[in-house]
Image (cartoon, rainbow, N blue to C red):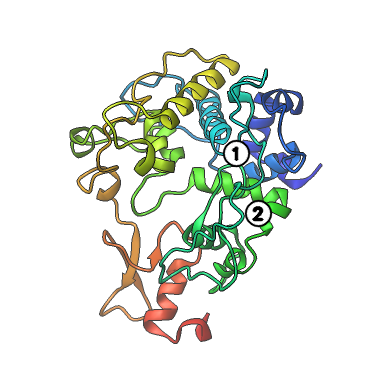
Amino acid sequence: MSEYATKENVVRVASILDEAKFDEFFPLKDDFYTYTNFLKAVGKFPHFCNEVNDDYTGLKTNAENIDQACKRELATLFAHIAYESGKMDPWDPIPKYKQGLHNVMEDCADCDEVETSNRYQAVTGKQYYGRGPLNIKGNNEYGAFGDAFGPSSYDSADRFLEDPDLLETDGYIAWASAIWFYMTPDFKNPSMHDVMTNFWIPNSGDTGANVIAGFGATTEIINGDVECRSNNDTDGSANRYVFFTQFLAEFGLHGGDVAGMSCAQYWSGFPHGGAHFSEPQYFVKKWGDNGKCQVVGYETPYNIYVEGDYKRCVCDVWENGADEC
């Protein structure tokens, strides 16, 4: 048996979703997306489908234990996959929520998606259009995914910046990009994982900005600027939460998971006075303590969520950068 198959979260996911059910959920999937590579990617992120906040005192709909929370996480992931890489054809006899994984890349071969970035600089001639189940795009996301993929090195971010096509030629990497996006917070947003397992708990700053716990917060994370800045639900937001409720039903969970389903009126996303921004997320030089960095609440080039960034901080601010790492 392969090593990944014995990991606790992989065993749980496989017991909930066997290959036959996987194929039933994605009957129009491209052959590129295999069940085996999906499970391998699950095993790379050991907290996926393997934890829930037992201390949370709010409404625990569909997240009363780890198995329920896992089904809720899978429903969330698959709902966004259905929208991001799905055929989205209302005339196809297959319902839209089961049309996911139809596309390996965006139909946008001339879109380079190059962004300004000090940390993740685009490589000349490379294109960072959407690829994989969740269509990660732009040199910032490709670079951050490279940092997280491991093994960590001073310039590990370069791997997918230099060869972004790996996300459309290696099915394991493609699946890993989707689960990485689901699992990883950034400066602006908590992770989808923390939202759906109740580790992100909105405070008064969040609720005052209409940002509440529930599936809608995950839509804000993936495409809030486009889908969550209106009085009423956009087509994208509505499609996503309808798909979510349909996958909940497939997993035998009730559709009562409705609080926070929408992201309408999320006028400014997760607010600076909210729970996410109250947590320090970056490293900076610790003056007076040779060879050390410390966590801070403002943005720096060194992220606590990126493996190796503490070492990179130390190397850059106390030593000679890459020459010391």
Task: Tell me if residue 54 can be seen.
Answer: no
Q: Secondary structure at mark 1?
A: loop
- Residue at the image point whose x is 75% and y is 43% from the top: 32
The N terminus lies in quadrant = top right
- Residue at the image point whose x is 56% and y is 44% from the top: 179
Identify the amino acid type marked 2: Leu
Which label belongs to residue 260?
none
- Residue at the image point whose x is 50% and y is 62% from the top: 139
Between label 2 and label 1, give the one nearer the viewer.
1
Residue at far right of view: 1
Give the x, y percent position of residue 140. 47, 61
Give the x, y percent position of residue 104. 67, 45
Marks 2 and 1, how far apart at CA: 13 Å
| Residue designated by label 2 | 167
Dividing the picture into quadrants, the one containing residue 124 is bottom right
Instruction: State yes or no: discs 2 and 1 in contact (Cβ < 8 Å).
Output: no
Identify the amino acid type marked 1: Ser
Q: Secondary structure at mark 2?
A: helix
| Residue designated by label 1 | 85
User: Does 225 appear above or below 316?
Assistant: above
User: Does 159 appear above or below 212?
Assistant: below
Give the x, y percent position of residue 191. 42, 43
Task: Tell me if residue 16 can be seen.
Answer: yes
Within-10-Å neighbours for mark 1: few <14, some 14–19, many 20+? many
Q: Earlier in the sequence, mark 2 or mark 1?
A: 1
Count all numbered tags in the image, as a single digit: 2
